[in-house]
Image (tube, rainbow, N blue to C red):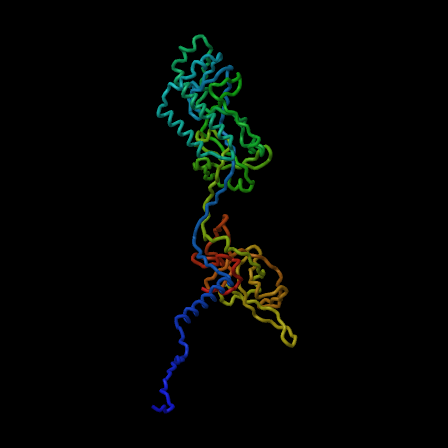
Amino acid sequence: MADNGSHGKQNKVISYEKRTAPRLNIGLIIIGFIFVQMLIYVIMYFNTSHIERHEVREGSLAVNTTYVGIALREETLVDNPSAGYVSFYIYDGERTAVGDLVYTVDETGKLEKASSGQFEESKLSDQELREFRSEIINYVHGFDDKNFESVYEFKRSLKNTVAKISNVNFLKNLEELSGNDVINYCYAPTTGVVSYWTDGYEGKTAEELTEKDFKKENYTKKQVIGDEVVEKDTPIYKICTSELWDVVIPMEKEQALALEEKGYVKVRFQKNQYESWANTKAVYGNDGNTYLKLSFNNSMVTFVSDRFLEVQLILEEETGLKIPLTAIVEKEFFLLEEPYLIDEGQKGKRTVIRQCYLEDGTISTERVTVGIYSYDEESKKYYVDATMLNTGDILHQLDNQTTDVVRERATLIGVYNINKGYADFREISILYQNEEYAIVKSDTEYGLKVYDYIVLNADSVKDQQFINK
């Protein structure tokens, strides 16, 4: 079969991808836009000052001051009539009547040996347990880790309490045990509160004190311990004969005289937070220093074991507008006399006539509106905004040719009020302040009112700066 020279052709099909324009992802665009916007806000936040507002409210601060004082009482020392072992029968701080047995003195010491072991055989009554509990509680509340000597005083006091309990039980059989031994019975010479310690301050008056008496490093307190040998003619205890007593504190003369004029003050004792009213009197010590004598007619027995007392004077609470100290700023002003200020009916503003020069060099005047921020009653001058005037400006009075040169400056304490959307200085009069807040007068002519808004941190703004709400 003849070949016709032609072969069957195979059709090869090549497919091409259809090219289309890229699709826009709207979601990604929106997310990207939000991200960029947030990034801009963050950058702006960290590069701009942040102004916090504070709403002015009424409040009060207690004016309290703490002092360390010396307690003075009517203290009568009682001497021991003979040497020997002493046994107490009255608690330290317990009230006794005339003729009550306070202690005995065993001159031979035989009874002291015979009494050993008596306490172990005794059971504590409810009253005795209450005495222990009260003594421990008072010690815990008054403990000061800077004064470790108080631990030893507490130990001696407990020892006396234990000895007293033992001695009371032993006293019932004392006559049988004593036989021919010499026992001296010592009775209270007067009514009062018994205390078994001395320090040399007994009988002192406020006028006899000096600065040296307040230094604890010079102070020595001698505690008499029961069941120990006591020498003859030495003070063995003292008896406080009156509920009237004083606490004397060192104080500046002006403040002491002011409190004396007031007549009384409320006092808080730091030892147990007990509060009482005291009469006040300024006194002068032997060294010429001024002291304040606080006189009480109660609670003497509560502090009978203390010579030094930390007291807090609770003065009157100052009430007014309470603002943080961070909001307070000091600003400088010009002082101008009233004849140079024209009242044209704008609240808090006045107009001055200032000398100026025209383009051709002739002298003329112009009116300038200035802000008024305070008035000094003593000098009869106004505090005027220093931004609108310059030192050396010549001012004219309205109805005559009298002139004055702007030169005198003074400062005021105040805050920035932002009620109108910009930092407007307002003078304040501080009544009292502590570490965080100040109490200022309210409703003063150029000052603040309750519910005004002020800048919390005065360092974050400038005078007349606009505030974004």
Measured from the top left, where is residue 231 in percent x and y? Answer: 53, 17
Residue at the limit of the structure toward the left, as seen here: 1
Residue at 62% x, 66% y: name it: 393
Counting labels gives 0
Quarter of the rendering occupied by the N terminus: bottom left
Residue at the limit of the structure toward the top, as seen here: 180
Measured from the top left, where is residue 464 in percent x and y? Answer: 52, 64
Residue at 43% x, 53% y: name it: 58
Quarter of the rendering occupied by the C terminus: bottom left
Measured from the top left, where is residue 381 in percent x and y? Answer: 57, 59
Residue at the limit of the structure toward the front, as seen here: 1
Out of 438 and 342, give the one closest to the viewer.
438
Residue at 56% x, 62% y: name it: 384
Measured from the top left, where is residue 251 in percent x and y? Answer: 54, 39
| Snapshot quadrant of residue 187 | top left
**Image check: 91 left or right of 288?**
left
Q: Judge whether 329 appears above or below 85 on screen.
A: below
**Image check: 118 left or right of 369?**
left
Out of 154 and 7, give the one closest to the viewer.
7
Q: Judge whether 135 appears above or below 27 on screen.
A: above
